[in-house]
Amino acid sequence: MEQVVWVRALSGCRLEVGFSDGLQGEIDVEPFLFGPMYAPLREPTFFQQVFVDSFGGVAWPNGADISAAGLHRRLERELALAV
């Protein structure tokens, strides 16, 4: 299973991520940001605090997280649409 090996917050609700299988690119994560746990991520300063968690996904200091599998599928979809 692929894991996120690095992540960088970009403007808006976008992340640049690199995966253990070599896939990398920018992902719009706004579709993942629903519910009270994810509300703080809409604040740019808080969104910038993203990090790779111990499970290989991405997370923020309040415990909000997005799985590597979900991010990987989203990036594959975005890259396919760009072709």
Image (cartoon, rainbow, N blue to C red):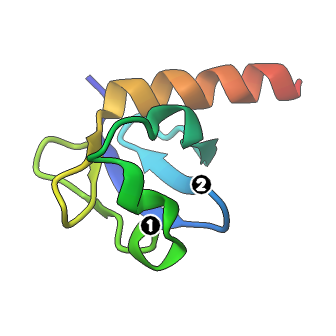
In this view, the residue farthest toward the right is 83
Q: In which quarter of the image is the N terminus?
A: top left
Which numbered disc flags the more N-terminal residue, 1 or 2? Answer: 2
Determine contact: label 1, label 2, CB under 8 Å.
yes
Residue at the spot of label 1: 47
User: Which residue occupies the extreme left position in the image?
Assistant: 54
| Numbered label attached to residue 81 | none
Instruction: Say which amino acid is labelled 1.
Output: Phe
Query: In front here: 27 or 29?
Result: 29
In this picture, is 38 found above or below 44? above
Q: In this view, does 25 lie above or below 45?
A: above
Q: In terms of depth relative to the viewer, which is nearer, 62 or 29?
A: 62
Q: Which residue lies furthest to the bottom in this view?
A: 45
| Whole-percent x, y for residue 64 in the image | 24, 49
Element at badge 2?
loop
Cα distance between the residues tagged 1 and 2: 8 Å
Compared to residue 54, the image places residue 9 above or below, namely below
Residue 71's spot in the image, x, y percent?
A: 45, 33
Image quarter where the C terminus lies is top right
Three-letter amino acid code at disc 2?
Cys
Near-viewer residue (30 or 58)? 30
Q: Residues within 10 Å of mark 2 (few under 14, many from 20)?
A: some
Q: Where is residue 68 in the image (x, y as percent from the top left)?
A: 33, 34
Q: Which residue is drawn at 30% across and 44% down?
A: 36
The crowding category of the residue bearing disc 1, from other C-alpha atoms within 10 Å (few below 14, some 14 to 19, many at least 20), is many
- At 34% across and 45% down in the image, what residue appears? 4
60 sits to left or right of 43: left
> Residue 57 location in percent, x, y?
27, 43
> Which residue is located at x 53 percent, y 38 percent?
23
Rendered residue at 63%/47% (across/down): 25
The residue singled out by tag 2 in the image is 13
Q: How many labels does the image show?
A: 2
